[in-house]
Image (cartoon, helix red, strand yellow):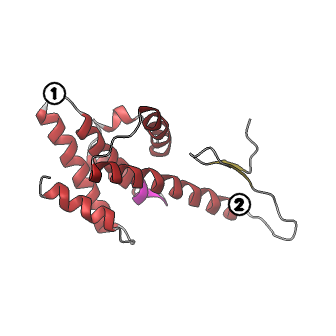
Amino acid sequence: MVPENTFIYSSGQIVFLRKNPNFAQTENTNSMIKQDYLIRMIQEIVALLVNALLRRKRIRQEDWSEYDAMASQLLGLPLSQLQTVDVDELADRYAGEESGIEKMELASLYLLRLSEETEGSIVFKSKLRQDGLRLLKRVHASSNTYSLQREMLIRMLDHGE
């Protein structure tokens, strides 16, 4: 069992947070630390996915397994279910959360990844791509931070490259 004040990064690094007796640690502080950690994990996965999509870079299956498990846990649903969920329903699901924008971006990139990997049905592949693009555009419009990677990916997908 992992101690309460322990964080394990995806790289395997383990960080122990010690309580400072001179610092009044509140529940709000713990919540902020956990929220920051979640956002960093999401950003790490998003950066990996964007780079893979933009550069058509192949990633080892073992790495995908680790990222898929982490993404599924962060999104709160199995990635197989992501293929069937309506984009508006997905956006509404994360709208009220503190890290909702980051989770929507992660979901959109996984939809795009699934569209790249889908074999067979061109219609289903196109639906996944359009859903991912629509959700990514929604994130881009409502996010209070600018991402050049996000903008370049949207442009690339809009022009059908």
Q: Residues within 10 Å of mark 1 (few under 14, many from 20)?
A: few
| Residue 103 inside the magenta-drawn segment | yes
Q: Which residue is mark 2?
A: 27
Q: Quadrant of residue 148?
A: bottom left
Residue found 45% across the figure and 33% down from its top: 65
The residue type indicated by label 2 comes to: Glu
Residue found 23% across the figure and 33% down from its top: 118
Residue found 62% across the figure and 56% down from its top: 34
Q: What secondary structure predominates along the stretch shown in magenta?
A: helix
Whether tag 2 and tag 1 are in contact, CB under 8 A, the answer is no
Residue occupying the far top of the picture: 120
Q: Which of the pair 153/78 is nearer the observer? A: 153
Q: In the visual, does 9 lie left or right of 96? A: right
Mark 2 or 1, nearer chain start: 2
Q: Which mark is residue 120?
A: 1
**x and y percent of residue 72 in the render?**
45, 39
Q: Residues within 10 Å of mark 2 (few under 14, many from 20)?
A: few
| Residue 61 inside the magenta-drawn segment | no
Q: In the visual, does 122 lie left or right of 85? A: left
Range of magenta residues:
98-104
